[in-house]
Image (cartoon, rainbow, N blue to C red):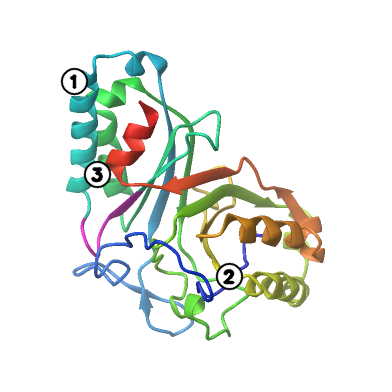
Amino acid sequence: MAETNAPETTAAHTVTPVAGPPAGYGSQPSGRPQHTHGGGAPVKRQIVAFSFYRILPEWKRLPAAEKDAHKAAFIAVIEKWQKPGEFLTMTYSTVGTRGDVDMLVWSICYSVEEMNRMRSELLATPLGGYIEIPHHFLSMTKRSQYQIDREDESEAESRGAIRPGGHKYIFVYPFWKTRPWYMLSMEERRRLMDEHIRVGLAYPRVKLNTTYSFGIDDQEFVVAFETNFPEDFVDLVQQLRETEASMYTLKDFPIFSCVRMTPEAMLDSIG
């Protein structure tokens, strides 16, 4: 399920807009080395981190004024690191949708060192002393092996840059293929993925961001589906289970259902 992609649309439905990424995000950062894929346009691959945080119960029992100060310091770090074209962070609540975490902090940048510094600053705030991290996924962008001949909107980005935002919900999970999958010929894998991709394209209101973790984290992929319509995602996943390629899925959980919120609203939802 890690290689399905579909162009985004909200036709025939009216939805409440959600703020997207800062203007210019996803463009090439100035002064950084660039790489090409297959002789195409230069692409600088991004570093992506999905950090799922749980707030200890002790924090919720603190005086309201102290909690407000903690929230303000945490939010200040997020705002400091919002750098158009360089570093983007989006925040989500998992209160009511996941029992072992309270929030998702999703960051995208071009440097492991910058990701390290940003997360270190978050955890160095007073609120950081009350944070546990049950799940954290690190990955990178990379052009898909199975859609390089497509000309749709998603593939035009060459998978070198994620342009997230504009959707109320995101569904995130790590993903592993079985070893026999990698023993198949590329021709056979393409045949299997063609069916997989056709199913995904039948759900144009679900946008997939696939990132790659080979060698830098435990999972092989991280998949993040953005949508305003959770019912479409449920139907998409059920139909993907019926594809031939699904026989080569080793693991595709835990799954995190997240609601897009401002940092203020996200923290207020916790306590």
Determine which of the numbered discs, if any, sits on residue 78 in the image: 3
Instruction: Kindly identify the amino acid type of the residue bearing the numbered disc 1.
Output: Ala
Left or right, 195 with reference to 217: right
| Rendered location of residue 10, percent (x, y) | 50, 72
Determine which of the numbered discs, if any, sits on residue 5 in the image: 2
Determine which of the numbered discs, if any, sits on residue 141 in the image: none
Instruction: Identify which residue is drawn at 21% across, 27% down.
Output: 68
The alpha-carbon separation of the residues under discs 2 and 3 comes to 29 Å
Q: Tell me where the magenta segment starts and ends, as one range.
A: 83-90
Determine which of the numbered discs, if any, sits on residue 65 in the image: 1
**In the image, residue 55 lies in the stretch drawn in magenta:** no
Instruction: Identify which residue is drawn at 82% across, 65% down.
Output: 244
Instruction: Identify which residue is drawn at 58% across, 47% down.
Output: 173
Q: Is residue 89 above or below residue 44?
A: above
Judging from the image, what secondary structure is the residue with disc 3 in? helix
Q: What kind of secondary structure does the magenta stretch mostly adopt?
A: loop
| Rendered location of residue 62, percent (x, y) | 28, 14
- Label 1 or label 3, whichever comes before in sequence order: 1
